[in-house]
Image: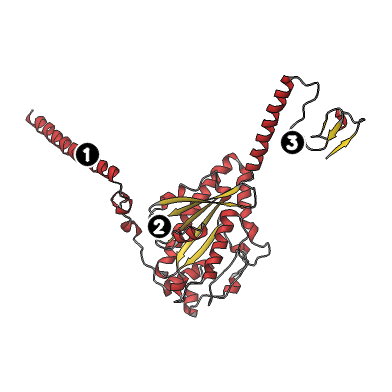
Amino acid sequence: MHCDVSYVTERDLPPGCYNDGKRVSLIPVSKRERMPRPSDSLWDIAIAEVQEKENATNEDDSEGAMQSDRSVFLIGNKNGGKTTIILRCLDRDEVSKPTLALEYTFGRRAKGHNTPKDIAHFWELGGGTSLLDLISIPITSENLRSFSVVLVLDLSKPEELWPAMESLLNSTRNHVNKVLADIGKTNSKLANQIKQDVWKSLPTDHPDRELIDPFPIPLLLIGSKYDIFQFTSKSESLKAVTRSFINHLAFGLDKSKSVSLDHNKPLHIPAGSDSLSQIGSPPATSSDLRQFSGSTPMELWKNVYKRFFPQQSTNDRKDVKDPAKDPQYAEKDVDSMRTQKDQELEQYKRNADKSWKTMALDSRAR
């Protein structure tokens, strides 16, 4: 829009508008090309063009800064369905393969037209509880503010569920607390903010608030293989709910608002929407309850659960294969070189052993 004014001076103009001596442009300079003045020299025009390019670059950088990066870490029982969940959320029609150690993938999603795509980093821990040391790799002080954990528990194996849950959650919590402590040394405000954010999903008047020790970062629990657990057919609605919760953590999308507290049906329980009084007492006799009377509600449920489902050792460490010998990851050139180096190493060991024996005999002869 242009308007003819002869009495407006440059200093009277609002920021971003330009007076060429005849007309006033109401279009911000940062959004249009600057029109040269009649008195401008070639040098003045060149300077103006450089400034316009710099302004455009700064605007692009500011728009790119709106792009968000989030990280989601899936842990849980071995062969519990973690990879399948990731593939479904990323709309990838692939056959899931067993996860070796720690695997990474990512997904992109645009919020709208001509907007930067948000990036979600997906980490998956394989091997159940056998590779707990790897938990420290994806969780760092740089990404903790946008990090969340998804614990996938295999409902078809209730005899392995509780120890896997305890081991994975305790190891993850301990490392997160360590990272929080490191952040607090350099940025106590950020560390306190992360700790306070955990309580936002819990109402201030929640009846169990005094008993709750919340997980230090967002946590989602998924009971997989519900169809096997309850001998029912697979449900597309359950898949949709799972995908909704994962996409909420990964891309900040609205999560499913459905709530189901009926234990005879699949449970959907957002944080803070349930309470111990609603859950009730565990199914146990009065003598059993008296036996566990000194325990916390969590310990009480744990003891009763383990009585119903005697827990078995998963022996995950014995089941872990050597990736170098797994035919699934065979590479002819690499494997042949590895075989050659292994043979050279064995020959070196034999020669070294002979040398040590010869030295020992010489020392005795002297």
Residue 324 location, x and y as percent? 30, 48
Vertical placement of 353 versus 145: above or below?
above
Residue type at tag 3: Arg
Cα–Cα span, label 3 and label 1: 69 Å
Residue 17 location, x and y as percent? 81, 34
Left or right: 130 in relation to 348: right
Front in this rendered view, residue 43 or 350: 43
Q: Which element type, helix, strand or loop, lies under badge 1?
A: helix
Q: Which element type, helix, strand or loop, lies under badge 2?
A: loop
Residue 24 location, x and y as percent? 85, 33
Nearer to us: label 2 or label 3? 3
Locate the N terminus by quadrant: top right
Q: Determine whether label 2 and label 1 are within 8 Å by CB.
A: no
Residue 321 occupies quadrant: bottom left
Inspect this view and state whether residue 140 appears: yes
Residue at the spot of label 2: 129
Residue 228 location, x and y as percent? 43, 73
Residue type at tag 2: Thr
Mark positioned earlier in the residue sequence (2 or 1): 2
Inspect this view and state whether residue 214 appears: no
Residue 65 occupies quadrant: top right
Residue at the spot of label 3: 32
Locate the C terminus by quadrant: top left
Left or right: 214 in relation to 13: left
Cα–Cα span, label 2 and label 1: 33 Å
Q: Which element type, helix, strand or loop, lies under badge 3?
A: loop
Nearer to us: label 2 or label 1? 1
Residue type at tag 1: Leu
Cα–Cα span, label 2 and label 3: 59 Å
Nearer to us: label 3 or label 1? 3
